[in-house]
Structure formats: structure tokens, C-alpha cells
Amino acid sequence: MSKKTMAKAVKLPSGNWNVKVFVGYDKNGKKIRKSFTAATRWEVERQAAEYLESRNDKKLTITVGEAIDSYIASKENVLAPSTIRGYKTVRRNRLPSIMLLDITEVNSINMQFAINEDARNVEWKSINEAKNLIVAACRMYGVKLDLSVTLPAKKRKIKKLPTAEQVIKAIKGSDVELPCMLSIWLSLRVSEVRGLQFRDIDNNVVTVCRSRICLNSKDTIRENNKTFYSTRQLTIPSYIQGLIGKVKHDNDTDFIVDMDYQTLCRHFKKQLALYGLSMNFHDLRHLNASVMLMLGVPDKYAMERGGWATNHTLKSVYQHTFSEERKAVDTKIDNYFNNLLGL
């Protein structure tokens, strides 16, 4: 008899014996137990054992899909909205045959068949995210999956982007110049660009501490960023200070870039198209990383400026944010972009 599923038999005031058997969880994550009562301890334990054997001590009362729904609900106010949105997409679209199974029925065989089916239409990253979400949701309910599966091969994508010089020439003087310069020069994500408020600037230093994310065509504001290392301070170059100075505002809580996400992306693509260029707004961060690599910026400072969390930045780099070495890095990058602007 499994100690994990059957509690110790106890004698009741009536003289009978009782034992409770753990049979699973409900949709809210609450444990479900089945109670057995008999005149003797031997009899009640026999009844419980037969019950467990009849159900093979396996099935719980929650499917993988239901477990994921509960997992998402439990993380709603903890994880970034974009992460929650990704989880919900996985729940709707990935590995559908697995979603219908009881969480104790998932094994390497049925998982592999589900992966093989999805591999017709989606790539490694999407399937791996789905597998990891299933494992995490089942673990929350006490079911540890030991899966041995083969994922589709990773496909290396080489994306050809315009040069920083071409992009700056295309956006200079346009209504998207400021958001673009914040991204390509200071390596801000689009949610960080749109989340900046005038109160975040102290002299020539901006604190990146807020995200404004578009979910279901509505803005969601979070007083934090995507990751711990995304909250950072950056020195604002004089050129960008000049662009910010032209933005009219009434209060310190006004957004520096008060443009909705769809409009920003649409205007950005339209502006680039005038010069025969094409890229996504997020690609500006990739260009920034390429510039830092080209200039030989040490990883420590590149990760610090961009807010990337890696093994290199897990150390206490933020206490050195404005060290002399960091100032030299800022100057080197500023000089590069100033040259592109002809300043």
C-alpha cells in the first residue's frame, strides 16, 4: 500500500476504523481524498488497498490542460504579461493530444507522438516551450515527469538587417526618431521605450524601471521590467536629450514616447520602407548589440547597458554602473552614433 496515497488508519470514537485515500486534486488544486470505514483495521485497509489497485493508483482528477490553466492563474501577477500571454498561446495551440490526458498519464511515448505531430508546423523553440510548461504545471501538482523525447532540430536563422547608419538616416527627423534612438542607441526594448516617463530622468541619467505592454490591443503598465537585470540606469547622450526636450508634457508622469504600440510599429516600418529598408522595431536592439560587438565593448558593460541576464552579469555589476571604465564605454558608443549623425 502506498504511503503517498493512503493515510494511516485511525480508530474512531464509535470503535470503527477509518482510513483516507488520496486520489488527486480538483481544478483549484485542492487535494481530494476518499474515506473508508470498517469494523476492523484489517478490513478498512483491505478496502482501501483494493480501491487503489482497481484504479491502478494512477489517475488523478485533473487533465494537463486544466493543470496548465491553474498554473497560469497562480502566476498571473508574478510573471511578465508577455510571458503569461505566451503560456496562454501554448495552452491553446500546442501539443493538443497531451492537454486532454490526466497528468499522471503523460509519458515519453505519448509526448513524443504529440511532439512529432506539432513538428509539422512549428519549430524547436515553440515545442520546447510547450514541453517545459507541461512539466512545470504537472510538477505543481506533485507529478514529476521524467521524459526522454526528441525535439525537432534547431534551425539557425541568419537575418540580414540594415546597418545602423542606414536606419539612422531613414528615421532622422521623423516622428519615430526618438523611440528608435532610445532603442538603437541605449538598447531599450519597445515596452521600455513606451514605459519611460519624465520623472525617470535625473539630470542626464534615465532609470529604466517600467514597462508599457500592449496586450489584446490595450496597454498594461508594470512598475518593473521583464527581468531583474532589465531595471538599469543609463546616461542619456546629448542628442537624445535634445529630442526629449522637444516633447511637450504637463506632468512628470507623462510618457516620453506617448504613441500606441501599433502606431509606433506601423510608422517605423513605413519610414524604413521609404528608404527600401525592412526590419522589426525589436531588431533595433540586435543592431545595438552588433554595434557594441563591433566596437569591442566588454561583455560586462554590453550586458549591463542592454539589461541582459547571463552568467557574466549574475555578479554584482550594478554597483559599478558609473565606474570610470563604464563611462569610457558610454563615450565610445556615443562617439560612434554622433559620427553617424554628423555631429
Image (tube, rainbow, N blue to C red):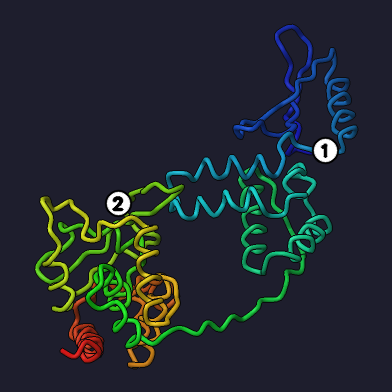
Q: Residue at position x 34%, y 62% from top?
A: 264
Disc on the earlier residue, 1 or 2 = 1
- Judge whether 79 appears above or below 44 on screen: below
Percent of width and height locating residue 46: 88, 26
Q: Residue at position x 33%, y 50% from top?
A: 222
Percent of width and height locating residue 27: 64, 32
Q: Residue at position x 39%, y 62% from top?
A: 227
Q: In the rendered image, which quarter contains the C terminus?
A: bottom left
Front position in the image: 75 or 280: 280
Q: Residue at position x 22%, y 64% from top?
A: 207
Q: Quickly name the residue at label 1.
A: 57
Q: Which mark is residue 223?
A: 2
Percent of width and height locating residue 208: 26, 63
Mark 2 Cα within 10 Å, few/some/many (few <14, many 20+)? few
Left or right position of 332 against 273:
left
Q: In the rendered image, which quarter contains the N terminus?
A: top right
Task: Tell me the SS state at disc 1.
Answer: loop
Mark 1 Cα within 10 Å, few/some/many (few <14, many 20+)? some
Front position in the image: 28 or 166: 166
How far is mark 1 from mark 2, CA to CA? Answer: 46 Å
Residue type pointed to by label 1: Asp
Task: Tell me the SS state at disc 2.
Answer: loop
Left or right position of 267 against 100:
left
